[in-house]
Amino acid sequence: MLAKRIIPCLDVNAGRVVKGINFVSLRDAGDPVEIARRYGQEGADEITFLDITASSDDRDLILPIIEQVADQVFIPLTVGGGVRSVGDVRRLLNAGADKISLNTAAISNPALVAEAAGKFGSQAIVVAIDAKETAPGRWGVFTHGGRNAAGLDAVAWAREVARLGAGEILLTSMDRDGTRQGFNLPLTRAVAEAVSVPVIASGGVGTLDHLAEGVLEGKADAVLAASIFHYGEYSIAAAKRHMAAKGIVMRMSW
Amino acid sequence: MERVVVVDYGMGNLRSVERALKHVAADAEVSISSSPEAVRNAHRVVFPGQGAMPDCMRYLRETGLEDAVRDAADRKPFLGICVGMQMLLEHSEEGDTPGLGILPGRVRRFAPPEGSGMKVPHMGWNEVAHDGAHPIWSGIASDERFYFVHSYYCAPGDGEVTAATCEYSLRFTAALARANIFATQFHPEKSHTVGLSLYRNFLAWTP
């Protein structure tokens, strides 16, 4: 049976890994290549890099990092953050990324999703959706770290990007991100059940139970977390054992 | 020194295949090439593929690589990956596209039952069950997990060429083998240590 995936996420700023607490205060968690290699050895099913570098001049700093990681870590690598054009997608893929995650650019220019999927294949294009609850059982899409409403319904937007050719959706609850209170399960489930492509749940993981809930209740195909792994609180292997013990099919040898 | 060529016909990112081969190839020269000449001069040929099969077939013809690929599949250790495996068959449902027809069979789209909640593409780590022994499986246990990402699967016309199967809404062929040809639907270059073992075995293989 197909295994559910655990994906550690590395937020990269000017060449270092950081994790935003509610996307505001940042703490340094170390060298991306070193961390990626360790995660690969610990059984990470994929690794996601999110480039949060503010200045576009510094954004190319991620390219040598991706190259070094791809030389040493042979699992799927996703890169997102600041990707605006087909040219950006191509540069990151050439550096060694397997999938590129589009967020704001997909909202301002949905044709980019279709164009990138057409050029590089749907398997290479992930659309990241940052969602916040706007009314009970309704979630809106937000940009700029949750500050700006995009005027889109998260579930409808997920359906739309899947139709445009996104091969996967990375869904982050902005209400939960950095809170360690667990995924927004109703949001995750609503999106996972609305689309035919895989959904990665993100935002809010504080315990190993939260990871299992994302799959069992949120119906996510994969779960993404950052801080619980970066600070050595839990290992990826321990997270996998925990999820497997809850009856979730996991990849347990590597 | 043995020359290993990864065929570049303009579809998809081949660097990860090259990196993985280089990682395990102590005494082989690994290169990516779009030159028919280089493919003809290679000792071993790796034939990857990503994206839509109609585009892959079109580019393969336009770049003039088709004959060199056919020649390699005829007589050299040859490894097809993902769409590079699918193209070896006769026909794909994807865009109603004729394949190379080197092996018998057709490529079909996953059609999970309504309400099953199964996602297409089939994306992630799944168990690959060997169908018979093969040198490429040396040191790799049956049911070991490899990384897949695909919406279409190979349905070979001759069960004899199936080297492994995998279960996703149905049991499909995850690897093909015949004489000097081996092909995988999954991505060894993204399958961590077990995938590197597969590449190592391919480089050591004398069909």
Image (spheres, coloured by chain):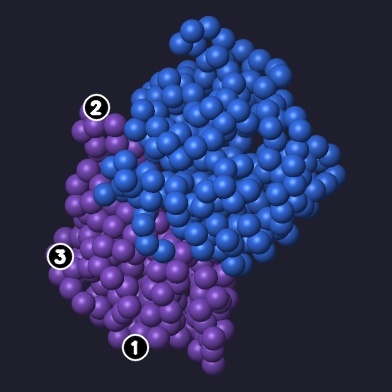
Chain colours: A blue, B purple
Subunit ID for the residue under disc 2: B
The lab-note entry on whether marks 1 and 2 share a chain reads: yes
Q: Secondary structure at mark 1?
A: loop
Counting residues from the N terminus, which is met first, the one under dot 3 or under dot 2?
2
Q: Residue furthest bottom?
A: B1
Q: Nearer the viewer, mark 3 or mark 2?
A: 2
Work out whether disc 1 and disc 3 sit on a shared chain.
yes
The residue that label 2 is drawn on is B115
Q: Using a 10 Å C-alpha cutoff, classify the residue at mark 3 as few (fewer than 14 neighbours), some (14 to 19) or many (20 or more).
A: few
Q: Nearer the viewer, residue A91 or B116?
A: B116
Which residue is found at the position 46% from the left and 11% from the top?
Answer: A137
- The kind of secondary structure element at disc 2 is loop
Callout 1: chain: B
Task: Locate residue B197, reporting x and y percent.
Answer: 41, 75
Front one among B197 and B96: B197
**How far is mark 1 from mark 2, CA to CA?**
47 Å
Asked whether residue A20 is in view, the answer is yes
Residue at point 70%, 35% (across, down): A20
Question: Toward the viewer: A40 or A92?
Answer: A40
Q: Amino acid at mark 1?
A: Thr
Residue B158: assigned label: 3
Displayed quadrant of residue B155: bottom left
In which quadrant is the N terminus of chain B drawn?
Answer: bottom right
Q: Are marks 3 and 2 on the same chain?
A: yes
Instruction: List the residue tagged with mark 1.
Output: B206
Q: Quadrant of the C terminus of chain B?
A: bottom left
| Location of residue A251 with respect to A117 vertically, above or below | below
